[in-house]
Image (cartoon, helix red, strand yellow):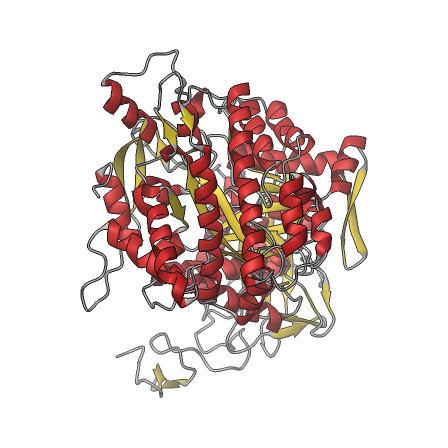
Amino acid sequence: MAFDNPFAGEIWSSKYRFTPPQGGGDASVAETWARVAKAIAKAEAPKLRKGFEAEVLDALTDFKVLPAGRILAGAGTARAVTLFNCFVMGVTPDDLGGIFDHVREAAVTLQQGGGVGMDFSSIRPNGARVEGVGADASGPLSFMDVWDAMCRTILSAGQRRGAMMGCLRIDHPDIEAFIDAKRAAGRFRNFNLSVLVTDPFMTALEADCDWPLSFGGQVHRTVRAADLWAKLMRATYDAAEPGVIFIDRVNAANNLAYCEEILASNPCGEQMLPPYGACLLGSLNLARLVDSPFEPGAALDEGKLGSLTRTTVRMLDNVIDISRFPLEAQAIEARAKRRLGIGVTGLADALVFCGARYGDDQAVALTQRWLGVIKREAYRASARLAAEKGPFELYDPQILERPNLTSLDEETRALIAAHGLRNGCLTSIAPTGTTSLLAGNVSSGIEPIFAYAYTRKVRQPDGSSREEQVEDYALAVWKRLRGETPPPEAAFVSAQDLTPADHLRMQAAAQALVDSSISKTVNCPETIAFDDFADIYRQGYRLGCKGLTTYRPNAITGSVLSVAPTPEPPAPELTLPSRPDALGGATYKIKWPDSAHAVYVTINDVEAQDGRHPFEIFVNSKNMEHYAWTLGLTRMISAVFRRGGDVSFVAEELKAVFDPRGGGWIDGRYTPSLLAAIGGVIERHLSGRPSREPAVAAPPQTGAQTATSTNPFAAAKACCPRCGGFEMVRKEGCDTCFDCGYSKCG
């Protein structure tokens, strides 16, 4: 078949078309559907394969059912990839070896095409004592930097952008730094971030109580719940992150609460999962199921919707059996619970076809009706599948008492009681970004239509982007049928026309009929008052939502979609404040082990209305060998200080630097490098703590010192700038490497 627009064909060719190096593969999207249907049917008994292959092929044809991208791209290709889109990794250990084992596990999962979510709440906070090595912990955020760098590396080696979700509990001592982490330019750009908000916190917030920040049963400090909430809301107001997951509500509503605890969510928030949890995703395209769109009697074919739901349950259940898994723990978890995530796409377009305006009473009623059909038919199909193939391994009859099942009709409950369930969870609503574009740019998931015609930025392999003009599916159908612009009274409404309350009504209506959660963004106008914005999250909690993500146009995140191209504004000219004639400060002495000469760090402060702030830094020593890098370092740090704002990240970055030749012990604490020691001085100065050594006057700088002075990095050999080896010696007045032959004078 031909695509509805050229952009859809490009999406298919670049993301889902199978093109093996030896030639052949998918010549058309119909061949992609045939490849996927054939692979899925292989999980059936031989006598059933041909019939089920035809059933799946019919469901895929014309984009009536949209399997998630990993299935479309990988099924039937024999590639070493997973067909699961999303995972949550295991509990992160609070020890260095275990942490890096988990980095490796996440890397393997990302490499095979799975997005990953992690809860970093199990890592001790920054500054906590690590008794085994006599040092202070760097905290979860420093290790998240490692994950972020790993994901960036995986991205550079492949075509698909790595996706990660990083979560931290609202009671973790580092929660405030986590909330503001994305304010730093370039930090955590491969992460989505969410705060795990508990019911007790929401209670403390309503009562205006204090809130303890604790780890391992020890309270580190106490904050006012309202102040912490305001900090979280201000970050989302300014930067659209972090999102919020109401983690206690998630666990209370979980079908499988009797055998698991939900840990975190997948990257887009629709799948809340236990350690090593995995979920398959697939969406029913409601926009293709409306008879006589725009006519007075337009209605969605609920019989067809039920039939497609039943096919999708069996189809995704089969994928569990044919898929590879990056880790054995993921395979064990998936096969023991057989979790599915059946959702919808094209909801907003279907509502337009039926004359309902997104967010109004009719739209809410139709959404509940259609999702009710999917829920009922999914549970019935899973029960019948259990009768045929057996229930999931950890099935227990007490699942019938879980909230999602007590609301089922008696006929469905009786069917489950008689046969069990093949699948522990069945429904969630995922984002369908590129698959909805593939299907002719139907509206994504349960989101409203962003705009009926807009410009989309498309990322290129070289990291650049180009712009594509895209038209919504509903508008294209209107033009095909009517050949004119829709009148104002038509049901066409876009995200720009809706209030946050409209978004919340739709999300809450859908959540009541979905097992897991929903990937949805509450769009807010740039001019929304902060208090009104903050109330969206409290209102979402009251309405029963499991999580919330908002977006308010801001300068930090930019946008992927825009209604009209806008010219790039000129970059603001950066001017640094001039230096006053006199500044006060302090000088700190670092006595680096095995060095003949101490290093002196001077930090001067400037007075402002809100207190003292660091303005400049100098590093001085009699040893001149490292004069160039210390001068460059201090000029850069001084420029950062003079720009103002939160500069604590400077200390954090320096403290993370290690010297491959070894660090040293200072006052009973191991310090990985001289740079890390300088970072510690900056941290102490910013916090107002006294230095470990008394401040003294810095020695006068002298040009009499030569490069033969004692190296402040201890007695280790110098590092070769060409090969990185440590066989550098001073020979004939010149540094020469015995490993590679490099000579500083050559």
How many marks can you see? 0
Image coordinates of residue 14 in percent, x first then y, are: 27, 52
Could you tell me if residue 506 is visible in this image? yes
- Front residue of this view, candidates 235 and 720: 235
Which residue is at a point 49% across and 43% down the rendered structure image?
Answer: 343
* In the image: residue 72, left or right of residue 412: left
- Front residue of this view, candidates 27 and 529: 27
- Front residue of this view, candidates 46 and 584: 46
- The C terminus - image quarter: bottom left
Note whether 142 is above or below 686 in the view shown: below
Image coordinates of residue 359 in percent, x first then y, are: 52, 23
Note whether 664 is above or below 237 in the view shown: below
Image coordinates of residue 137 in percent, x first then y, are: 67, 63
Image coordinates of residue 68 in percent, x first then y, are: 41, 50
- Front residue of this view, candidates 429 and 14: 429
- The N terminus - image quarter: top left
Could you tell me if residue 518 is visible in this image? no
* In the image: residue 80, left or right of residue 335: left
